[in-house]
Amino acid sequence: MSSLLSRAPLSGADWFAVELDPATREVVMLDQRLLPGEVRYHRFHKPDDVANAIRDMVVRGAPAIGIAAAYALALVARDEQGDAKMFLVANGMAGRILNGTRPTAINLAWSIARMARRAGEVADLDPETRFEGMLAEAEAIHREDVAACRRMGALGADDVPDGAVILTHCNAGALATGGYGTALGVVRAAHAQGKNVRVLADETRPYLQGARLTAWELQQDGIPVEVITDSMAGHFLQRGEIQFVVVGSDRIAANADVANKIGTYSVAVLANRHEVPFTVAAPWSTVDLRTRSGADIPIEQRSREEVARVGNTWMVADGIACRHPGFDITPAALIDAIYTERGVVRPKAGERPDVLLG
Ligand code: MRU
């Protein structure tokens, strides 16, 4: 797939969720809505189209949408030929549109804020140099995310027992990040250490990120994976067939409560009931020390259609409402470890993310 770009992807693999092609100055994204049936990349020329792609789930996963937003802001710099004030207005407007696309993942706001700081630093330069500065910042965000995934992966892998069956929920892999993955980074690192690991991937109703994306990307790497429906996790935990659970996160509050894909909380309760380690892997950009607890994290409410329809078949009769929170909150008390590039937080032992500061 690298022939799609004028250079090797920053993802570190020959496939990727999101990259900027320096030759054409366009954002290139794998359409995750089509996987696993079709591997199709789209090119995005306009910042608004990147925002729509985030909203429409072409790209998804907290770090990946943050990176996509950063590249969109580089496109704004490419197009804005006016003075410093006009450039900053254009950057601010695009940032607000991008930030409104998905509310739960803090990586989006984090990335937009970082690009806004950079915009302030380059605003007085000529348009071409301004673009180069914004692109360099977006690429730094991307590269740092891949490096963070590798670091947290290595830390998490140390806790994974050899021979473990690892349960994961949703997709917190290369497709959800700049590359390598958070939860799947832990799996990849354990596999690379020579540990004999296998993955059980929750299908992750209703959007099926586990069945469609996690299984596909582990298959690319030759890591053994089996898909189960979400309702089977308790059964396999009860039978002692799962030794480790690792998931990603969209936002980690100051008290170590974790927001992640709907269904994560149920998995955490079940893992605790069966005394199987429940762990989270996330970059520091997912930690939001300004949000006190999980109760303060906004939960994205998604469409009735995603619940009521499976493929082309309607499962729910017309006129019947459905509920569809996209995320839930797992309390710190249920979490054994949070792996970040800064180190490991052990919430059950009373640690909070700020132990890693300073
Ligand atoms: O709705 P999605 O697919 O964007 O949700 C993604 C998740 O919940 C992931 O687990 C989370 O973003 C972490 S990705 C490294």
Image (cartoon, helix red, strand yellow):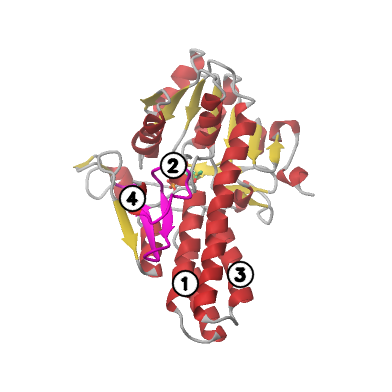
Left or right: residue 358 versus residue 174 is right
Q: Which mark is residue 118?
A: 3
Q: Which residue is mark 4?
A: 3
Measure how far apart labels 2 and 1 are at the Cα level.
30 Å
Q: Position of residue 52 (x, y in %)?
A: 36, 62
- The part of the chain drawn in magenta is 5-33
Q: Tell me if residue 9 comes above or below residue 121 in the rendering.
A: above
Mark 3 surroundings: few (<14), some (14-19) or many (≥20) residues within 10 A = some
Look at the numbered disc 3 and say if its residue's Cβ is closer than 8 Å to ligand 1: no
Examine the rendering and report whether any part of residue 52 can be seen: yes
User: Which element type, helix, strand or loop, lies under badge 1?
Assistant: helix
Upstream in sequence: badge 2 or badge 4: 4
What residue appears at the point 35 percent right and 67 percent down from the top-left corner?
45
Mark 3 or 1: the one toward you: 3
Residue 53 placement (x, y as % from top left) = 36, 59
Q: Per the image, is 309 magenta?
A: no
